[in-house]
Image (spheres, grey):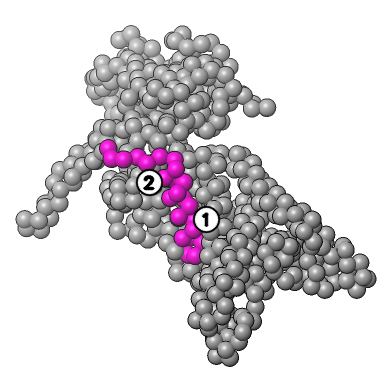
Amino acid sequence: MIATESLSKRFPRVTALDRLSVDVGPGVTGLVGANGAGKSTLIKILLGLSPATEGRAEVLGLDVATEGAAIRERVGYMPEHDCLPPDVSATEFVVHMARMSGLPPTAARERTADTLRHVGLYEERYRPIGGYSTGMKQRVKLAQALVHDPQLVFLDEPTNGLDPVGRDEMLGLIRRIHTDFGISVLVTSHLLGELERTCDHVVVVDGGKLLRSSSTTDFTQTTTPLAIEVTDTDEHPDGTRAVREALHARGVSVEDGSGLPGAGHILLLTAQGEQTYDLVRDVIADLGLGLVRMEQRRHHISEVFRNGADSGEERKEAVGHGG
Amino acid sequence: MAAEQSTRTPVTASGDTRIHNIGYRSYDGARLGRAYARRSLYSQSLRGSYGLGRSVKSKVLPMLLFVVMCVPAAIMVAVAVATKAKDLPVDYTRYAIVMQAVISLYVASQAPQSVSRDLRFKTVPLYFSRPIETADYVRAKFAALASALFILTAAPLLVLYVGALLAKLDFSDQTKGFAQGLVSVALLSLLFAGIGLVIASVTPRRGFGIAAVIAVLTITYGAVSTLQAIAEVQNSGDSIAWIGLFSPITLIDGVQSAFLGAASAFPGGVGPSNAEGIVYVLVTLGLIAASYGLLMRRYKKVGL
């Protein structure tokens, strides 16, 4: 779907992309990076709107430098920022955008009705956009990116500004874009957690460099840091310590969650696949303790950087950019 | 995912009524490409210039100005027919000059409507993420506003012409005058659209755009006609023509009095000579080209 080869983009004062080489196949791909990591710059280059300083890139087998218009006819783009005029209705706006993508008038109207329904906008689509909630606006933005039935869509921070429920609905919708609509997706976010659940493949960039590119199953199954908190009982007045010792005895290395909130009561360990979860469950049950929580503890991309560097999969310079 | 499955299952509503989600249908019909997209943008912008496809509120001003442009023409025609006059009370070429305040107001209200909104609500990136390019956007917007202005300025001329024929005035005279008038307002439309769009494209704020366009059109005209009046009093008649180069409406006046048989509205009624007239035409065309160039430069920078 997308292939870049030592792609660089330098502005007078910053290097937005630094020799980025990445291959993205069909399916849902997450592009993760902190703000300013070069995600939006990459999308601009892939749409053929901004020339790369060095290197080359292909989208759907078309060269971004020379075949930008052909690429833009076949891909959709949902920007990060607000982009909707408040005084027209969603229907009018999406019909207009469909025509701007080259759809004949009748097809534009039919596709608009279909697409708005698929993203979950019903009666409200005849009202002016100005009165919509953030969630509804995000749906309209998504609809205008899908209305011409592209082969690939770029979604720039689609969950921005949504509440947890809206976020889950949007992620479900993104998943459906691939499974039901058959459209491949490149979705950016600075939250790895939410992309893990949605994407088949995750690409992590930082400071314009590729940190890691692997399928999500690799991410979740091998190296998930796990946080555990247990209750104390009369039998084990310090439950945390008891669990640590029991796990040590089974050959699992455990760290204290020092520096984290609730330090001293939290144990950190690295889950090596399904069996670790079972082991933890059994150990705690044997001790007769209550399990307060067991959660995946990776909310920061910096931890991926550390993992990436530790496992030696990626270039060493990654460490310098951690955080 | 749970959400996925539920949307696929038929939902049983009351009784036997069932709602089936027919699922996603892909599109493999025609994709008409860049030229079609440009035309679509043109027609959407042209309709928008008269508030069509927009809210009722935004129809009021352009429609009102259109009526205000046409009513005097209708009255003149009525008078000419009733009094069996030998000629219309005003020349075709003169009409737009007389009504310049209305035209300026129209440009000031509709140029920002056309481009400032796209900038303010950041819709421009959506256009450029589609097959069209900077040049297509600029051409579509420019052509749309120029067409809207041409409709505004040519409609009253049509009223005058039809009225003149009804009053059985000389056919060839009237046709010639009408044609000259159309050429003049076509030039005026291009010039005013260019100036209006360049000013409006600089600001995402519609209010600033309106104020700036009115200021540029009226202040230049005020300054030029004052200087011309002073020049006439001081008997330096030669400079009157050269001063006229510095405001859009006197520029059009100069072009048409030199080449389109119009009586000049300059003080003393003396328009530019033929040689000076060529300078007028060149300046007019130069300004139109410069507006286009400036718009292109402006939109090169407004990427995503």
In three-dimensional space, the C-alpha distance between marks 1 and 2, rounded to whole angstroms, equals 20 Å
The picture places residue A96, in percent across and down from the top left corner, at 40, 51
The picture places residue A259, in percent across and down from the top left corner, at 51, 25
Q: Mark 2 lies on which chain?
A: A
Q: In which quarter of the image is the C terminus of chain A?
A: top right
Q: Which residue is drawn at 54% across and 28% down?
A: A38
Q: Is residue B43 magenta?
A: yes
Q: Between residue B11 and residue B155, name the one nearer to us.
A: B155
Q: Is residue A266 above or below residue B209?
A: above
Q: Does the magenta stretch include residue B229?
A: no
In the image, the segment drawn in magenta is B28-51
Give the SS element for disc 2.
helix
Mark seen at residue B195: none
Classify mark 2: residues with Cα within 10 Å, few (<14), some (14-19) or many (20+). Answer: many
The picture places residue B277, in percent across and down from the top left corner, at 76, 58
Q: What residue type is labelled 2?
A: Ala
Q: Which residue is drawn at 57% across and 52% down?
A: B142
Q: Between residue B7 and residue A43, name the one nearer to us.
A: A43
Q: Which residue is drawn at 88% across and 63% down?
A: B238
In this rendering, position of residue B256 left or right of residue A147: right
Mark seen at residue B144: 1
Q: In which quarter of the image is the N terminus of chain A?
A: top left
Residue that mark 2 sits on: A98
The picture places residue B100, in percent across and down from the top left corner, at 66, 70
